Image: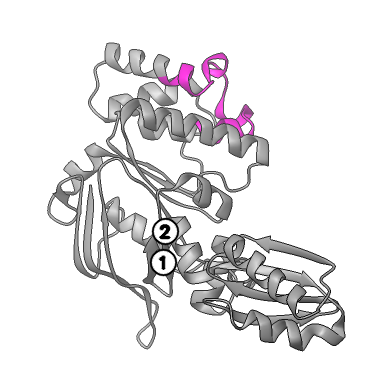
């Protein structure tokens, strides 16, 4: 559905300053995949999506989307994709049902087909009771569901979602994703999304692409990235006088790394926490080192980002917002 090679985008700020927003992204997305793109503010995620949706032209490189080149066939690309941007797409003074009907007309649907599709989307996204209400009267969650509905009016095979749940409370986020995933299953859609919610990417995406400074720095399933780039962390509660001995024992574990000790706790990162913990506890018992408590912490995608870049994604986002 998507194939890019060395895609770049530069923005000329002044005669002496050029911002290299995207620095050569190569990416393939197969039909039916749900791919999450992660990265801090300013990493190039939204710029990449805007190039793939033909909203801005690439500086260099190539990209085909839904079988068509984004440079030479932008109209055909647009007919085959849906795009939900970060801002609300509906007019504040328009009625919900009218916005969907108008969107259908934009895509060349006759009025009967547009009415049928509008009714279907209103039902599926729980907007039926709001059809006559003005957009300005909707809650944040209702507006985002309307944005998704507008992106799906023409039944695209590929849907781009740029931070679709930002600003929603946990209940509305879960509700929105329930609708999106159900629609995806019904219509076998391919979905590419950007998000700052790591739990969304972890639990729903079949692939996670990590972008930093306009480049892809990791691309795999969330589970593989967490295991290969982060690993499990074992935390033992022991007396401070035994920290060095526990570390010596932990160093014998396969893939042991990143030793830390704070207060009465010692931690070590390993490849297989559940498998390594009994070995470490057995060695401690044999060596006469009492262990008061032991835990295995599974890695997160933020651990992956920290491992790749030396900073957490949350810290990077905070820095980016402060700089903005």
Q: In x, y percent, where is residue 176?
A: 54, 34
Quadrant in the rendering for residue 63? bottom left
Give the distance between the C-alpha atoms of the residues marked 1 and 2, in whole angstroms. Answer: 6 Å
Point 19% across, 68% down: residue: 61
Q: Is residue 57 above or below residue 197?
A: below
Q: In x, y percent, where is residue 273?
A: 60, 64
Q: Is residue 8 magenta?
A: no
Residue 188 visible in image:
yes
158 left or right, relative to 312: left
Q: Is residue 187 above or below residue 4?
A: above
In this view of the protein, which residue sits in the foreground, 4 or 18?
Answer: 4
Magenta residues, start to end? 121-145
**Label number found at residue 146:** none
Q: Quadrant of the C terminus?
A: bottom right
Name the residue carrying label 1: 44
User: Predominant secondary structure in magenta?
Assistant: helix
Confirm or deny contact between disc 1 and disc 2 (CB under 8 A): yes
In this view of the protein, which residue sits in the foreground, 246 or 171?
Answer: 246
In this view of the protein, which residue sits in the foreground, 93 or 22?
Answer: 22
Quadrant in the rendering for residue 293? bottom right
Name the residue carrying label 2: 46
184 left or right, relative to 132: left
Point 65% across, 79% down: residue: 250
Residue 197 visible in image:
no
Which residue in the rendered view is the most extreme toward the left? 72
Point 38% across, 29% down: residue: 185
């Amino acid at each position: 559905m998507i194939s890019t090679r060395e895609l770049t985008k530069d923005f000329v700020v002044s005669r002496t300053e050029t911002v290299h927003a995207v620095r050569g992204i190569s990416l393939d997305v197969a039909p039916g995949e749900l791919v999450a793109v992660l990265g801090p503010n300013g990493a190039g995620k939204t710029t990449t999506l805007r190039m793939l949706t033909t909203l801005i032209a690439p500086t260099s490189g190539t990209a085909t989307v839904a079988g068509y080149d984004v440079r030479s066939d932008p109209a055909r690309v647009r007919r085959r994709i849906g795009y939900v941007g970060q801002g609300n797409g509906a007019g504040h003074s328009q009625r919900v049902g009218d916005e969907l009907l108008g969107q259908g007309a934009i895509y060349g649907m006759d009025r009967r087909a547009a009415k049928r599709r509008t009714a279907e989307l209103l039902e599926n996204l729980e907007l039926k009771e709001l059809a006559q209400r003005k957009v300005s009267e909707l809650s944040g969650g209702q507006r985002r569901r309307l944005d998704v509905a507008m992106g799906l009016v023409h039944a695209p095979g590929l849907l781009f979602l740029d931070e679709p749940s930002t600003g929603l409370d946990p209940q509305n986020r879960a509700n929105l994703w329930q609708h999106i995933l159900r629609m995806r299953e019904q219509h076998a859609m391919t979905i590419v999304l950007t998000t700052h919610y790591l739990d969304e990417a972890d639990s729903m995406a079949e692939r996670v692409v990590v972008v930093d400074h306009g480049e892809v720095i990791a691309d795999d399933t969330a589970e593989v990235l967490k295991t290969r780039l982060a690993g499990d962390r074992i935390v033992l509660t022991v007396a401070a006088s035994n920290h060095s001995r526990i570390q010596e024992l932990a160093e014998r574990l396969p893939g042991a790394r990143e030793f830390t000790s704070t207060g009465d706790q010692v931690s070590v990162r390993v490849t297989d926490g559940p498998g390594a913990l009994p070995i470490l506890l057995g060695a401690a018992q044999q060596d006469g080192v009492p262990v008061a408590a032991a835990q295995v912490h599974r890695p997160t995608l933020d651990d992956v980002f920290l491992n790749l870049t030396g900073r957490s994604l949350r810290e990077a986002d905070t820095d980016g917002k402060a700089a903005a």
